[in-house]
Amino acid sequence: MQSRPKFIFVTGGVMSGLGKGVTTSSTAKLLQLAGYNVSCVKIDPYVNYDAGTMNPVAHGEVFVTDDGGECDMDIGNYERFIDTSMTKDHNITTGRIYLDVIEAEREGKYLGQCVQIIPHVTDAIKENLKKTTEKEKLDIMVVECGGTVGDIESLPFLEAFRQMALEVGRSNTLFIHVTLAPVLDVVGEQKTKPTQHSVQELRRIGIQPDILAVRCKTPLTTDARRKISLFASVDQENVISCHDAPSIYKVPEVLESQKMLKVVAKSLTLKRSKPRWGDWKRIASSFSNYKGDVGIAVVGKYVTLPDSYVSVYHALSHAGAKIGKKVEIDWIDSEKFEDGAQRKVASLGDYDGILAPGGFGKRGSEGIIAAASFARENEIPYLGICFGFQLAIVAFARHVCGLSGANSTELDAHTKHPVVDFMPEQRSVHDMGGTMRLGGHDIAVEQGTIAHKLYGANSIRRRHRHRYEFNQNYLGAVKKGGLVLSAHSDSGKRMEILEIPKHPFYFAVQYHAEFSSRPGKPEQAFEGFVKAAARS
Ligand code: GLN
């Protein structure tokens, strides 16, 4: 639509955790609502090739794209806001860029040159951004740089942004700097000095921001706006207050109430500067207009950091918003339920539903098995995801089929009954990064099952991230016990969904249903689960 694609670069100042991802997603959403073909890229300046090998408790969830990318969790925000399925190209790390550059050097592509950060690394960054933008025929690409201005590791990326402005032209690039206006005293004055310093730091490396998105608790005062405008050398209308909103999906409206699109359109010489809201406002409001609530216990391994299950959180909230119920989540460490602590497990009876999310390794696994059994025996709605699917099978095999000592070989390599086992093709795998069964796979759903009713389709596509699977040697035994395996993939090679028809809602999936949920369009397993929990 545009003659040349445009780039918006979002940088962070003052400190991390200001919601740069939400500002990026909301800006992209506004442009999408104005009719532009827009997408986002997240730059993570760490040296890891991707997020796949990172500890979720330290870094947050690994978000899986349909093409099998193990990405930063911000990609999940982008997908949820602009409802677009992204590829791994939308997450760039220092590791990825350096690997490309070093491989090119080994192939002799630099023809004897001394390979340097400027221009070779910065060129590789720019090439990557341009390639994805062209491949997807985008009008506008919004690029978010992780970290805070001043970090050593983000310097080559910021330098590449600076060069982009020079190369593609100032009217095709826009810089948004996200900062904070804290309030320290009882008088409640919003402090602008951190923003001033952060802008100076950005300028020092050659970037003059066009827009300042200032995080604050209450709307930015006229005085603070005036000061920031003066010191940062931007018009007052280019200082956007990003004050607290009742839900993240309201942020596009917060931005637009200050004519954000007009400001962006002016800088980027865009013709259209009015969003056509369609359903968006109604959907966004559904996250703050609740009648009643539903109490869900998420029993998992990485609960000390709720970000490690951030897509599960969002999927639950999408399902709750759709039925007008606020989902109240308690994050419970499954280790609490280990060693036959029956009394503690019984505390799960206080919840309307129990969800067991993904996980790896032995620690806490017996606690998840105990929770899966408790939900089954006490008719509490249960949703199991990946590890939660596998351990629901273990629980069923042990307690319903009488296969004592049944387990997953991930947790007990010598179990008598390996009801969950390594996928055969995983046996030859030695590298840890990028080698699980990853990404979107087509799944055939059996007619006449709960799964078929929920999905309303014979075939669905969902994302995966696992090495173990249900061992079909035990198919006869679990079927006899009343477990229905209602969906499969790879021509029946892998089981994807289990359900217990006699239970109010006992449903577990080998795939990560949470990555496919969107505001206004909750993933069906989550919707079914939250509905059942609301009834209980
Ligand atoms: N650890 C299990 C496996 O690798 C489950 C993985 C997960 O929950 N993502 O199969």
Image (spheres, rainbow, N blue to C red):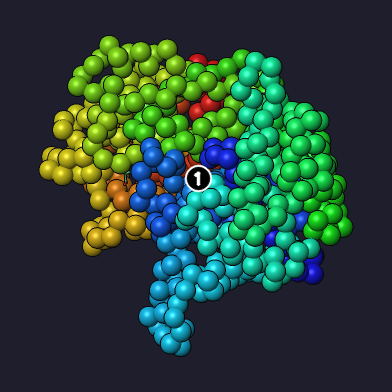
Q: Horizontally, is 15 left or right of 35 in the view?
A: left
> Where in the figure is residue 24, as x and y percent of width and height?
65, 47
The structure residue drawn at horizontal position 44% and vertical position 16%, both measured from the top left corner, is: 351
Q: Mark 1: which amino acid?
A: Met
Question: Is 195 placed above or below 145 here?
Answer: above
x 37%, y 80%: residue: 106
Label 1 CB less than 8 angstroms from ligand 1 = no
Residue nearest the viewer, comparing 174 with 458: 174
The answer to whether residue 117 is visible is yes
- Most extreme residue toward the bottom is 111
Q: Is residue 127 above or below residue 360?
A: below
Q: Which quadrant is home to the N terminus?
A: bottom right
Q: Which residue is mark 1?
A: 73
If the picture is divided into quarters, which one holds ligand 1?
top left
The residue shown at (20%, 44%) is 409
The answer to whether residue 287 is left or right of residue 385 is right
Label 1: how many residues lie within 10 Å, few (<14), some (14-19) or many (20+)?
many
Secondary structure type for disc 1: loop
Left/right of residue 205 with respect to residue 407 in the rendered view: right
Q: Is residue 355 left or right of residue 77?
A: left
Snapshot quadrant of residue 181: top right
**Towards the viewer: 492 or 441:** 441
Residue at 42% in and 19% down? 380
Residue 368 horizontal/vertical position (percent): 31, 29
Residue 266 picture location, percent across and down:
84, 54
> In the picture shown, does residue 214 fall above or below 460?
above
In this rendering, does residue 486 appear at all? no
Residue 187: image quadrant is top right
- Across and down, in percent, residue 278 comes to 80, 41
Marks counted in the figure total: 1
